[in-house]
Amino acid sequence: MLQDSAPPQVHDALAAPPALPGQAAPRDARGAAFDWIDAAGAERRRAGLVRTLRPRPAESPLLDLASNDYLGLARHPEVTRGAAQAAHRWGAGATGSRLVTGSTELHARLEHELAEFCGFEAALVLSSGYAANLAAVTALTSDGTLIVSDAGNHASLIDGCRLSRARTAVVPHAGPEAVRTALAGHDGRALAVTDSVFSVDGDAAPLPALAEACRAYGAGLVVDDAHGLGVLGEGGRGALSAARLAGDGDVVATVTLSKSLGSQGGAVLGPARVIEHLVNTARSFIFDTGLAPAAVGGALAALRLLRREPQRAARAGEVARALHGRLTAAGLTAVRPDAAVVSVRAPSPEQAVRWAADCREASLQVGCFRPPSVPDGISRLRLTARADLTDAQIDEAVGTIVATAPDRR
């Protein structure tokens, strides 16, 4: 039987409690916890560092020199068909972590073919290249490990160092002697981590010299080959293959499937015992949902296409060198590309943003890198040298970039 026939009182969970006798009514504090965001946003605007999302249509009228689709495979019919067929057969999602229900026969096939193509004993596919770097760095280190990290490394490697709780020594960019010096002062387990091709300027790491420095002190070497796979090495087999380090017992590579392979996801490649160790200890693998079957199918189709058409890798390099040569001949400052990234310096963050916007208005999409995304604080346009660009498109892109340059308007 109801004890009280009066209607229940409805309470507003967000309302401030009533003031007690003798107390002033409390200020309405709803939202006050994030008031600091307004000041931070104002500071970004003053510094010209505001970032904006620009959703693109399925069919863009812009000439794309901004994406990481180095081989032009993201929309290739074979790749999209591979993704669609995988989704139809295996479902829209992996349904769970790789250790529960998220590993399909398709995942295993991609891991086998990717390891074989790149020259490694084994591979492990994760949900992103970011997750792959976190897995490799954190699982191969401990409290007593020294990590020697290049100052120009990608944010995912930097975050891996932070999460590892190991001692990290940041050394000057592309400096094998600095790596050797850091290792010489440490007694115990050690690991050097570096990008193979640095995403900001597109320059390559001196991998043979780094490997030599590591081996002198028994250290492992982890190389993020996100920007090397599909572009460097014979037929695009990657920077480690080009340096004749692929498959070595003290070398681990990480790659992304979202650049040259036009899909999504990441992988760690290395000795079988390293991969088994990651399966059992890497948190970004164990506790993450497996890569969606469509992404796996798309990446596998792209890998097989690259095997059949190795000339795509060489073409990407040709386009990069053509862009660099013509832009520097026009008086712009551009870094010599070692792979498929061409970096063109801008006078300031504000002018870099305006330059990219002017290019977009002229139907050219380019990347714009500014602090804090760039370790040296120098703003620049970042151009992608795609293998499927025609000579006419290269001419068009160079003409637009030169005509819209800040000192020529």
Image (cartoon, rainbow, N blue to C red):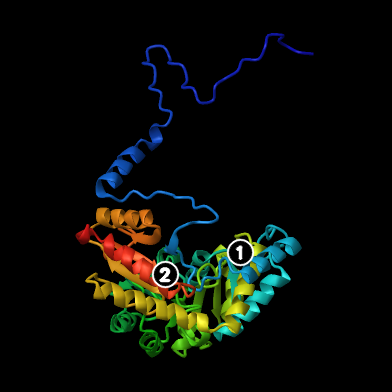
Left or right: 169 in relation to 105: left
Front-most of residues 75 and 246: 75
For the N terminus, the image quarter is: top right
Q: Is residue 237 above or below residue 287?
A: below
Residue 156, image x, y percentages:
44, 65
Q: Secondary structure at mark 1?
A: helix
Label disc, if present, on residue 377 of the rendered structure? none
> The disc labelled 2 sits on which kind of residue?
Gln
Question: Which of pointers 2 and 1 lies earlier in the amino acid sequence?
Answer: 1
* Res 108 seen here: yes
For the C terminus, the image quarter is: bottom left
Q: Give the residue displayed 50% in from the left and 69% down from the top.
A: 259
Q: Secondary structure at mark 2?
A: helix
Left or right: 294 in relation to 379: right
Q: What residue does disc 2 label?
A: 393
Left or right: 274 in relation to 145: right
Q: Give the residue displayed 32% in from the left and 75% down from the top.
A: 324
- Cα distance, mark 2 to mark 1? 44 Å
Q: Is residue 272 above or below residue 22?
A: below
Q: Is residue 362 above or below residue 245?
A: above
Q: What residue does disc 1 label?
A: 286
Q: Give the residue displayed 52% in from the left and 52% down from the top.
A: 57
The single residue placed furthest to the front in the displayed view is: 392
Residue 340, image x, y percentages:
41, 75
> The disc labelled 1 sits on which kind of residue?
Ile
The single residue placed furthest to the right in the displayed view is: 1
Q: Quick one: label 1, few (<14), some, or many (20+) residues within 10 Å?
A: some
Q: Quadrant of residue 367?
A: bottom left
Q: Is residue 44 above or below residue 123?
A: above
Residue 21, image x, y percentages:
41, 11
Front-most of residues 93 and 78: 78
